[in-house]
Amino acid sequence: MKFFGRSELAIKAASIGAVLLFSVSASQAQSSGPFAGFEGAWTGTGTVSLSDGSTERIRCKADYKVAGTGLSLKQALHCASESYKFDLTSDVTSQGERISGNWSETNRNIFGNLQGTAGGGQIEVFVEANGFAANLSLRTNGTKQTVQISSKGEIRGVNITMTKG
């Protein structure tokens, strides 16, 4: 009977060990995937350059959700100045360092596709929609992130620096 009790204890210990190992593996997959370092809430400031040549200061907040596998990312970026506002969302998946997905900007009711690369705390994508195209670059290093957008549309350029937390 004692032997059975020890086996039962060993099975429970092995089960707990497997659960812990799975938890660590899942978090390592997320932290080592192409979107490592992006998860969480970010806030900051920057500038937006418009097609009329004006430049304005903007305040921004972003929220990134990385799937448990580390292979998909949902982004929401909201920025506003005295006279300008944009709300950009994207849903991205990766295959290795190559990424693709969909994006939208709700204030102008535009949406489209994106493609590019991700890894090492960087995301570089080309976004396009009917009559619109832009390059978007995100770089994360610890608790600091920079976002740069360039296009030939109404928004000519955006430069943002944000911190996590």
Image (tube, rainbow, N blue to C red):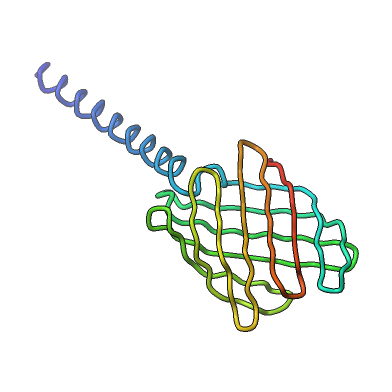
Left or right: residue 165 versus residue 120 is: right
Say above or below: 4 vs 120: above
How many numbered tags mark residues here? 0
Left or right: residue 105 versus residue 103 is: right
- The quarter of the image holding the C terminus is top right
Closest to the observer, 111 or 21: 111
**Residue 146 in picture, x, y percent from top left:** 68, 48
Report the residue at 74% width, 47% height from top: 161
**Residue 15 in picture, x, y percent from top left:** 26, 33
**Residue 33 in picture, x, y percent from top left:** 43, 46
Closest to the observer, 93 or 137: 137
Report the residue at 44% width, 44% height from top: 30
Left or right: residue 126 versus residue 161 is: left
Report the residue at 71% width, 42% height from top: 163
- The quarter of the image holding the N terminus is top left
Report the residue at 65% width, 78% height from top: 132
- Residue 127 lies in quadrant: bottom right
Left or right: residue 52 versus residue 36 is: right
- Residue 51 lies in quadrant: bottom right
Q: Residue furthest bottom?
A: 130
Closest to the observer, 76 or 116: 116
**Residue 47 in picture, x, y percent from top left:** 81, 56
